[in-house]
Amino acid sequence: MTFNPLQISGLVLGFFGMVGTLATALLPQWRVSAFVGSNIIVFERLWEGLWMNCIRQVKVRLQCKFYNSLLSLPPALEAARALMCVAVALSLIALLIGISGMKKIQCKGSNERVKTYLLGTSGVLFILTGIFILIPVCWTANIIIRDFYNPAVHIGQKRELGAALFLGWASTAVLFIGGGLLCGFCCCNIKKQKHRYPAAGHPAPHTDKRPQNGTVLSKTSTSYV
């Protein structure tokens, strides 16, 4: 069997979405220091991520430090950590299921219908992964924007949107497209199989091609005078 373009495109996009999900979870650029007001010329730049914060000073290499205590973290950060871990696990499972559903992967006892359902399951999991990424990314972006325009927050405490948030949004879009392609491929194959094979309750009509008794007798009978 040959590969379907929807199948290939969906799995390729799912793979890139999985890589983007992992990079979004690991990069420290979720919140970056903002240059506002008189804070234009700065001697250090601060990055804050899910697992560590980094600081880059003038003529000093980048220094990163993991968070010491898990219990001292803000609830929003703990929730974002948990959701991103679930997203990474779901993307990996979805990719493995999608690879198992490839038409040229021969498995014992597998058939075309089972592989079609595997690809559909992979597409649904990719879409769920995008949702799990979208929640913490949008939540963090909302907190950053809210604090940025809050006059009660000191200028030195204001943050801007980091590169990891934009990567998360891009990964979500890629996962949605890849999952949609795989689900579309599954639906198309199911419809083809329904048209190809008759339903179990409506068997195909059977025509009896045996000759009639009268015809046989007329051909075999002989008259004696």
Image (cartoon, grey):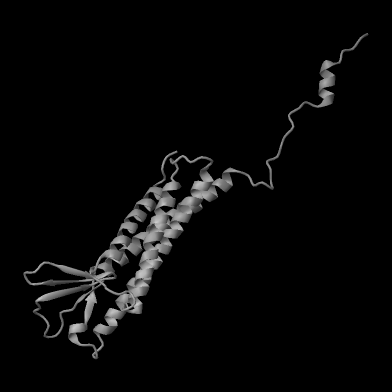
Is 64 left or right of 94, judged from the image as shown?
left
Quadrant where the C terminus sits is: top right
- Which residue occupies the extreme front position in the image? 69
Quadrant where the N terminus sits is: top left
- Which residue occupies the extreme left position in the image? 59
- Image location (x, y in percent) of residue 70: 32, 74
Rendered residue at 57%/43% (across/down): 196
Is 196 left or right of 57, judged from the image as shown?
right
Q: Is residue 215 visible?
A: yes
- Image location (x, y in percent) of residue 13: 35, 55
- Image location (x, y in percent) of residue 28: 24, 68
Quarter of the image for residue 209 reads top right
- Image location (x, y in percent) of residue 59: 6, 69
Total numbered badges shown on the rendered structure: 0
Is 105 left or right of 200, judged from the image as shown?
left
Rendered residue at 42%/55% (across/down): 94
Vertical side of 51 occupied by 103: above or below? above
Vertical side of 73 occupied by 155: above or below? below
In front of the other: 194 or 165: 165
Q: Is residue 188 visible?
A: no
